[in-house]
């Protein structure tokens, strides 16, 4: 049974991507491709940074942690959505829904704070380089493909308590503080870069900052729009698309953004792949 009584919810019903079986399978294969790309990209970044001791610097340490958080956040929502699309189901258990909410907020919050720290890392590296080394009847149905706080709050009949309101104000203040810190860091970074006399130095500084700035922009723009968009333009389809953007796209795109712009990472990855292939080739010959 879905409910034991009117006040006890044992499971939620997530939003189905489509009613037709063919479209459900299409969504499964699409999410599977995105998920495998995220696993491969972030896994390669983690392996490369851990393998190459030349990359054991603060910047790459933060990048490794970002990859770990990306793997965690996309693994929190996408596998369950894939399973529902594959089997044509919609349900998620109460405990599973609670786990999704807390894990997603913890991982996305940790990623936001990590991006804030990374902006400070770039600030010190560029502005103070000499100090760098030291410094649901259906009343429980959710219009979303994973458990998200705004959708769950829509099911609540009670008003916000002072404690809940205080928590929201505290979280908003903390997130706003991080945003202001990131903006101020990049203001100082761009001022320092524009004062550099050599064009080559400016290009190198910009090349290290642009990936981080792109990740921050993608992460914030999709998340802010998903939560703060006007109700007049809200629709189930738009809510679904925007939530997929901030919960699925950044973890899949972050490895591509960083690997495309970071020459040290590309060189280390090339060495890792070459080393692995050489060991594979030597193994049969040595056994013979």
Image: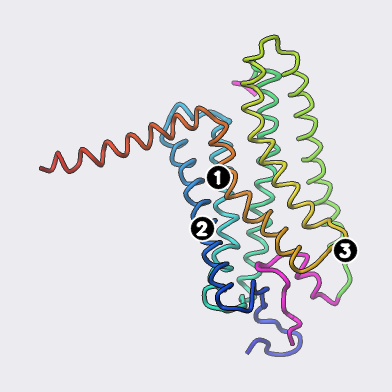
Q: Find the distance from the CA under tag 3 to the CA under tag 1.
A: 34 Å
Q: Secondary structure at mark 1?
A: helix
Expressed as whole percent of the image width and height from the top left, the position of residue 179 reads: 79, 40
Q: Which mark is residue 67?
A: 1
Which residue is depicted at the point 62% across and 78% down? 91
Q: Main secondary structure of the magenta part?
A: loop
Residue 10 lies in what quarter of the image? bottom right
Closer to the camera: disc 3 or disc 1?
Answer: 3
Magenta run includes residue 61? no
Check if mark 3's residue and mark 2's residue have beta carbons within 8 Å: no
* Magenta highlight range: 132-157
Quarter placement of the N terminus: bottom right
Residue positioned 44% across, 41% down in the render: 47
Secondary structure under tag 3 reads helix
Residue 153 lies in the magenta stretch: yes
Q: Nearer the viewer, mark 3 or mark 2?
A: 2
Q: Residue at x 70, y 82 (%)?
A: 9
Under circle 2, the secondary element is: helix
Residue marked by disc 3:
231
Vertical comparison of 219 with 129: above or below: below
Q: How far apart in space, not on screen, are marks 3 and 2 (Cα)?
A: 32 Å
Nearest-to-viewer mark from 1 and 2: 2
Marks 3 and 1, the one that precedes in the sequence = 1
**Which residue has dot 2 on it?**
33
Q: Residue pushed farthest top?
A: 197
């Amino acid at each position: 049974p879905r409910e034991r009584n009117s006040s006890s919810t044992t499971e939620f019903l997530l939003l189905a991507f489509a009613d037709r079986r063919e479209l459900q399978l299409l969504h499964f294969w699409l999410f599977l491709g995105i998920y495998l790309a995220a696993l491969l990209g972030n896994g390669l970044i983690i392996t490369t940074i851990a393998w190459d001791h030349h990359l054991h610097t603060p910047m790459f340490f933060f990048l490794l942690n970002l990859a770990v958080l990306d793997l965690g956040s996309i693994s929190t929502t996408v596998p369950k959505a894939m399973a529902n699309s594959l089997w044509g189901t919609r349900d998620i258990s109460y405990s599973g829904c609670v786990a999704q909410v807390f894990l997603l907020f913890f991982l996305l919050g940790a990623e936001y704070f990590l991006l804030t720290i990374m902006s400070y890392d770039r600030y010190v590296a560029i502005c103070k380089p000499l100090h760098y080394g030291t410094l649901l009847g259906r009343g429980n149905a959710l219009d979303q493909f994973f458990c998200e706080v705004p959708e769950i709050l829509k099911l609540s009949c009670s008003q916000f308590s002072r404690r809940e309101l205080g928590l929201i104000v505290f979280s908003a203040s903390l997130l706003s503080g991080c945003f202001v810190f990131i903006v101020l860091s990049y203001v100082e970074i761009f001022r320092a870069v524009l004062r550099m006399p050599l064009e080559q130095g400016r290009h190198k500084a910009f090349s290290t900052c642009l990936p981080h700035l792109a990740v921050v922009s993608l992460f914030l723009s999709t998340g802010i729009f998903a939560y703060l968009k006007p109700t007049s333009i809200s629709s189930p389809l738009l809510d679904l698309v925007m939530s997929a953007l901030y919960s699925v796209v950044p973890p899949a795109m972050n490895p591509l953004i960083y690997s495309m712009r970071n020459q040290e990472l590309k060189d280390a990855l090339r060495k890792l792949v070459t080393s692995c292939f050489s060991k594979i080739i030597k193994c049969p010959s040595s056994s013979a």
